[in-house]
């Protein structure tokens, strides 16, 4: 059995400066410079995510971070006001409204959720549980 002292996740970006501005300023998360040009993203729950530059970065095609919010409509409005596009999916199997929100709660299909991309093209979401 592996005895872990800590567990954390990580993902790559193609532009560390753009990632630092996006996660810190646009999303309002606590982010700091790490060793060797990396970033440390502190999660509200106390965990950490390692963000690292990768020259041949390819955006994740899955959701790498989910931000739980109290009011999804307010969160989406705030993101849109900051230039973040939340209407990234047009899929009949995943219907979203004009704001890009999949209204899962009303359909008894999970949380209300809206997806968007970081500057490196990685997929993130805001969701109201």
Image (cartoon, rainbow, N blue to C red):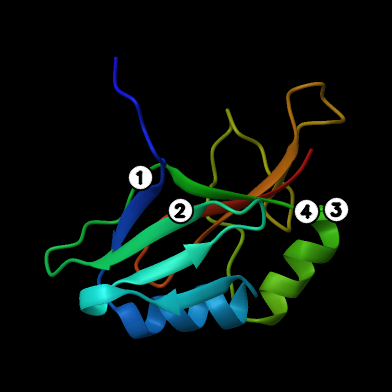
Q: State the residue at coordinates (41%, 40%).
A: 7
Crowd class of label 3 (few under 14; some 14 to 19; many from 20; radius 10 Å): few
Contact, CB < 8 Å: mark 2 with mark 1?
A: yes
x and y percent of residue 70 in the render? Answer: 85, 53
Residue at 51%, 77% (x, y): give it.
22
Q: Real-space Cα distance between discs 2 and 4?
A: 17 Å
CA neighbours of label 4 inside 10 A, class few (<14), some (14 to 19), many (20+) = some
Report which quarter residue 87 is drawn in: bottom right
Q: Secondary structure at mark 4?
A: loop
Residue that carries the numbered disc 3 in the rendered image? 70
Quadrant location of residue 20? bottom left
Percent coordinates x, y for residue 15 in the rendering = 29, 78
Look at the numbered disc 1 and give the secondary structure of its residue: loop
Pinpoint residue 106: horizontal percent, then vertical percent.
Answer: 87, 30
Per the model, the C-alpha gap separating discs 3 and 2 is: 20 Å
Q: Earlier in the sequence, mark 4 or mark 1?
A: 1
Label for residue 123? 2
Horizontal side, residue 14 vs residue 92: left or right: left
């Amino acid at each position: 059995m592996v005895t872990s002292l800590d567990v954390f996740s990580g993902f790559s970006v193609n532009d560390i400066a753009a990632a630092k501005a996006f996660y810190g300023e646009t999303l309002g998360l606590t982010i700091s410079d790490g060793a060797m040009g990396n970033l440390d993203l502190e999660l509200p729950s106390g965990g950490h995510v390692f963000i690292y530059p990768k020259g041949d970065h390819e955006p994740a095609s899955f959701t790498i971070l989910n931000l739980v919010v109290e009011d999804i409509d307010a969160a989406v409005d705030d993101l849109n006001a900051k230039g973040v596009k939340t209407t990234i999916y047009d899929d009949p199997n995943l219907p979203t409204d004009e704001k890009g929100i999949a209204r899962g709660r009303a359909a008894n299909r999970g949380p209300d959720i809206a997806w968007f991309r970081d500057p490196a093209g990685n997929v993130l979401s805001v969701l109201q549980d």
